[in-house]
């Protein structure tokens, strides 16, 4: 971990330019290290972008989003169960703050504020209506003392990696709490289920940030750092562990806390690691 941190610090210092070095520079650097969504600095003029704050302030917008998903699922499967659409939308939304936070923690050792007012998402215009773009609208961030941008007015310095992990956990949980409160008004999912989905999103995104960037083990280590134990209302510590695939190879996997309800679609079955499978096996 010390070697990895030294490499990050050296790369970050080398790329920082006089008078720059803020969050926008970090976002531009990490954007090319992943392919899950377009990352933007500020709100682009093109595309159907929705500020997260607007969605949380007007939960009926989630209902419209679920209707679009229901149309897509019905075209493919002939049906769109309410719990399935509700779970998909919850997971997609929660990955927006989780993935931004995970990417910047992993690659830059920075954590943005992650407030709903400072994030926006773009829903894919064709095909599956999942978020295919994330925009970061704010400039403030938390960082380590060694960060070359630590003297910037928008930077808040914390003591070490452990403190930075705690900031990510707190900022993400604050955003997730606002989502849970808003989404419960318009979905059939309860608070426990939504907090389980929030836990899955954060744990998975920390893992993906490392894997997408070429160092899966470091992503797993970040997940263990941020979710070293259960921090309520999140429902568990990181559940990442080694496992054997169907082909017999050993690799990283995780036990899900929430169910996506894909098994309700015709011809579909429970996902690997689904909590429903564990409950049935233990009964």
Image: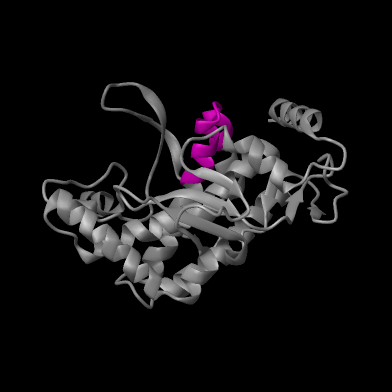
Relative to 56, does residue 17 appear above or below in the rendering?
A: above
Which residue is farthest bottom? 185
Q: Quadrant of residue 74?
A: bottom left
User: Which quadrant, please, contains the C terminus?
Assistant: bottom left
Of the pair 40 and 199, the residue shown nearer to us: 40
Residue under the point 74% across and 52% down: 142
Q: Which residues are magenta?
A: 204-220
- 157 left or right, relative to 168: right
Whether residue 26 sits left or right of residue 84 in the image: it is right
User: Residue 219 magenta-drawn?
Assistant: yes
x and y, in percent, of residue 198 in the image: 46, 58
Q: Is residue 63 left or right of residue 13?
A: left
Query: Could you tell me which residue is drawn at 54 percent across and 38 percent down?
Result: 209
Q: Position of residue 6 (x, y in %)?
A: 76, 28
Q: Where is residue 15 shown, x and y percent of the image?
A: 77, 30
Display coloring: one colour
Identity of the residue drawn at 87% across and 37% down: 18
One can see residue 238 in this view: no
Q: Where is residue 151 shown, x and y percent of the image?
A: 88, 49
Residue 76 higher or lower than 245, as above or below? below
Q: Quadrant of the N terminus?
A: top right
Q: Is residue 277 magenta?
A: no
């Amino acid at each position: 971990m010390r070697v990895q941190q030294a490499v990050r610090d050296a790369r970050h210092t080398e790329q920082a330019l006089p008078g720059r070095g803020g969050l926008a520079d970090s976002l531009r650097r990490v954007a090319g290290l992943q392919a899950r969504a377009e990352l933007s600095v500020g709100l682009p003029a093109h595309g159907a972008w929705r500020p997260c704050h607007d969605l949380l302030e007007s939960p009926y917008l989630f209902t419209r989003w679920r209707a679009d998903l229901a149309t897509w699922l019905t075209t493919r499967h002939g049906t769109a169960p309410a719990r399935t659409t509700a779970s998909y939308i919850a997971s997609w939304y929660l990955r927006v703050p989780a993935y931004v936070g995970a990417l910047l923690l992993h690659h830059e050792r920075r954590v943005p504020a992650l407030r709903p007012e400072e994030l926006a998402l773009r829903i894919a215009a064709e095909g599956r209506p999942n978020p295919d773009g994330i925009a970061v609208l704010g400039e403030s961030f938390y960082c380590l003392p060694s960060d070359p941008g630590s003297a910037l007015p928008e930077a808040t310095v914390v003591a070490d990696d452990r403190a930075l992990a705690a900031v990510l956990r707190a900022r993400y949980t604050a955003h997730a709490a606002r989502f849970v409160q808003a989404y419960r008004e318009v979905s059939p999912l309860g608070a426990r289920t939504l907090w389980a989905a929030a836990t899955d999103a954060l744990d998975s995104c920390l893992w993906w940030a490392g894997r997408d960037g070429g160092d899966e083990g470091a992503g797993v280590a970040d997940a263990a750092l941020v979710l070293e134990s259960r921090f309520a209302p999140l429902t568990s510590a990181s559940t990442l562990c080694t496992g054997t695939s169907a082909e017999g190879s050993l690799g990283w996997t995780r036990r899900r806390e929430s169910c996506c309800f894909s098994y309700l679609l015709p011809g579909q079955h429970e996902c690997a690691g689904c909590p429903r499978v564990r409950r049935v096996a233990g009964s």
